[in-house]
Image: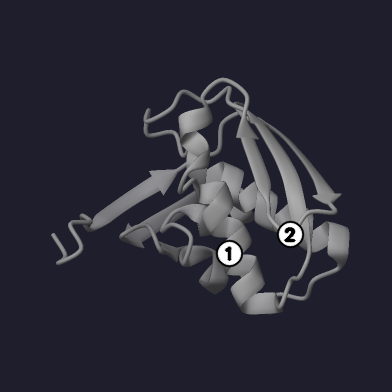
Amino acid sequence: MRNSNLHEVESLIVPIDLFDEIGIKINDKEYDEIIFKDNSDLSKNSTVHKALLCLRRNTGLDKYFDISVNKCIPIQAGLGGGSSDAAAVMVSISNMLGLSLPDFATIAKDVGSDVPFFINGKTSKIKGIGDKIK
């Protein structure tokens, strides 16, 4: 176990056909509005919010968004629901705005250790805290 209370792992991760539904649009406000349709408590400190902060920190992004998330992946089930949402938001906004991210996986790791897996989206062998992907 590391000092951060994260366990070292070596595992094979396989993507499955289960996903949350996410809507993203640019808003005219000076803040992001993130709505989890079935559980408003998730919007505070969510991985989606962390993904937006990470994009702003690494790209100079100056736009704000209305984001709606309809959770279909069971919460806290170990299926990567939050991490996959963060990855989807980062990739979608980058594509929408033509943002250039030379090392997406390194940036995504700042949001969560398994977010790079969901950006890759392929069967992968992971090590460390989930941050080393092959």
- Residue 24 image offset from top left, x and y in percent: 78, 43
Q: Is residue 55 left or right of residue 9?
A: right
Q: Secondary structure at mark 2?
A: loop
Residue at 31%, 59% (x, y): give it: 129
Give the left or right position of residue 91, taking residue 46 as reference: right
Nearest the eye: 43 or 98: 43
The percent position of residue 76, horizontal first and vertical second, equals: 37, 31
121 w.r.t. 99: above or below: above
Q: Which residue is mark 2?
A: 30
Residue 67: mark in rendering: none
- Residue labelled with disc 1: 53
Q: Name the residue rendered at 67%, 44% in the picture.
A: 33
In-front residue for pair 90/1: 90
Residue farthest toward the front in the current orientation of the protein: 29
Say which label, 1 or 2, has the lower sequence index. Answer: 2
Which part of the image, by quadrant, shows the N terminus? bottom left
Residue sitting nearer the eye, 104 or 133: 104
Vertical placement of 105 versus 41: above or below? below
| x, y percent for residue 11 | 34, 49
Compute the Cα span from label 1 to label 2. 14 Å
Q: Say which amino acid is labelled 2.
A: Glu
Identify the residue at horizontal 50%, vertical 46% (top origin): 83
